[in-house]
Amino acid sequence: MAAPWWLLGLLLLPLIRWLHRGGVPLRALPVAHLGLWPAATPPTGQGAQMPPDPAWRRRALLVALLLLALAGPRWPDARQRVTLWVDDAPAMLLRDAGATRLAAGLARAGALLSALGDAEVELRTLSDPWRPQPWPGTRASVGVARGAPQADGRADEMAEVLAASIRRRLDADTAQDLQEAGCCVPVPPPAALLRPERAHWLLTAGTGAAQADWPGGRGPERVIEVGAAAHNVGLVRLAARRKTEDPRQVELLAVLANGGDADETRSLTVTADGSPPRRIERRIAPGSVAVVTIDLPASASPVRATLEPTDALPEDDALDLDLAALRPRTVAADAACAPALRAALAVHPMLSLADPPPPPAPDGGRAAAPQAAPDAVVDCGGGGLPAGLPTLRLHAETLPTLRTGAPGWPTSVPAARRPRLDAGALPLGARLHAGRTDRVLLALGDEPVIVRRAARPTVVETSIDIGAAREIGDALPLLVALMVDELFGARLLEQSAIADRGLDAARVLPLAAAAGPPAASGAGTGPAAAAVPPVRELGGWLAGAAALVLGWEIAQLARRHRAAARAYRP
């Protein structure tokens, strides 16, 4: 019983019987005159008691069922419930004796679970713990997602399902791809899933902290550790960015990690479109990384890096990198833009200056060749620009001299990106008004001169008359770079392309390998709380029975009400 004190309410059942007790029945006695009634002979059976109302049985049964349901009766369930947690780290794909660690571990876990008999087993992975999967050949537990992959009673097919998920995570190049694949880094199980009525087992290669730091200090009741000391070198990171001294070149950085227990020598081969293959050899100590840098043409895309010779974990020996994030953004400026502005746009390493698209040819004329749409436009008042694109708008009207003051920058612009400005060298040709939702990027005194409008697509406006500026000097390219970064919502000069798997992707050596060979199965090293014996809750059944009795009682009351209405009907 979960709350046995509710059973004290059963003492009220005799009270219900007493409230429905019978009384002296009323009898009809016909007399000739009312004055003769006191002398009339009482009928036979006068003084007999009426039986109690039989409705007391239904009402007593209803109260008893409700009290028993509130007491929470439980029935011991001899069937065992087990949650098998699989540490789906990339090291589980390492091949040993013709099979992966994952397949060997699931086969070993299947042998141990089959010895439990009629057990309820669910499988969860540490990278996606909230999606349970039924263990092959056993009954599914409550909460298993509909359509979850099953292995038709064979652990090797379940191993293929999990291995495919690990490979998708290794092939993902960005964090966005990882979210789309529904994968994440294996971590200890959340506390909400460590239910005390289940026994929790862990299948792991021991390469991470999967069996340490479980919530509440609780560890797995049984650890099935597979794999021993092994050899593996993985390609864990590729990163590229344009070289500041030569924007036509891209600097590629490759990180190799030795996750095994011996010195390894690997040859890194980098291939890219428009560039001959590059091959570099490195020797890496156990637990160390090697960093390789290669210069490639900026037009090279995509890039593929491979390691040779391959090892027992070939899934981490190749990595692809897309350099699309490093391509220059095309900006179209109209004919009214000042030469100084066009020059500042042209020297920006991440911009490609283009002219506005030509007007449509008149009837009978020869149409110009179509041009690709620009990524943004610079509007200096000359017109002819396509609409619906991010716009840098310059205002250069003929106005009286505007009030100026010391340059003021918002806190969102770091000091390294603030050029030194002389307020007297920045002639203003218009007055800007900043709305409540607009963001001022530069102000002279209380006069906003560069404003990012709260609009979609992005609009950045400035009142600096660049054509009239004479002594702005090197500050102009920096101001243009600041406005362009706001236009595209990114720091273009700091753009980089990254494909990162993390160092754990190459680790195949168990963390506890120095302490001796791993055990096939046994208790975890951390504290493991004993599973509470499973029980079956009977409160729901009793509540359902009480609902049926209540419906019966309502039906009887309705029947009596209809009978009384017919009796008193004139």
Image: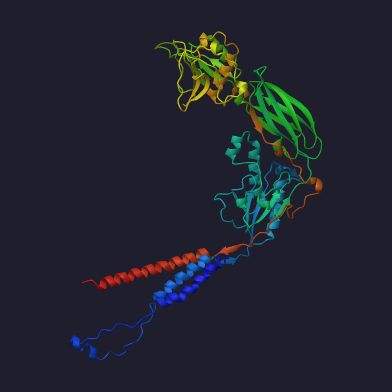
Query: Would residue 41 be found to the left or right of residue 106 on screen?
Result: left
In which quadrant is the N terminus drawn? bottom right
* Residue 76 position (above or below residue 134): below
Q: Is residue 390 visible?
A: no
- Residue 32, image x, y percentages: 18, 88
- The correct choice, above or below, for 538 with respect to 152 in the image is below
Residue 476, x across and y down, in percent: 57, 14
The quadrant holding residue 414 is top right
Would residue 547 be visible to someone looking at this image? yes
**Residue found 63% across the figure and 33% down from its top:** 173
Colour scheme in the image? rainbow
Of 390 and 373, the residue lying toward us: 390
What x and y, as percent, mark residue 375? 52, 22
Task: Determine whether, in the image, residue 125 is placed left or right of residue 564.
Answer: right
The residue depicted at 49 percent of the width and 68 percent of the height is 67
567 relative to 27, above or below? above
Which of 269 and 156 lies nearest the eye of the viewer? Answer: 269
- Name the residue: 27% across, 70% down: 565
The image quadrant where one finds the C terminus is bottom left
Left or right of 230, for residue 27: left
Q: Position of residue 495 (x, y in %)?
A: 62, 25
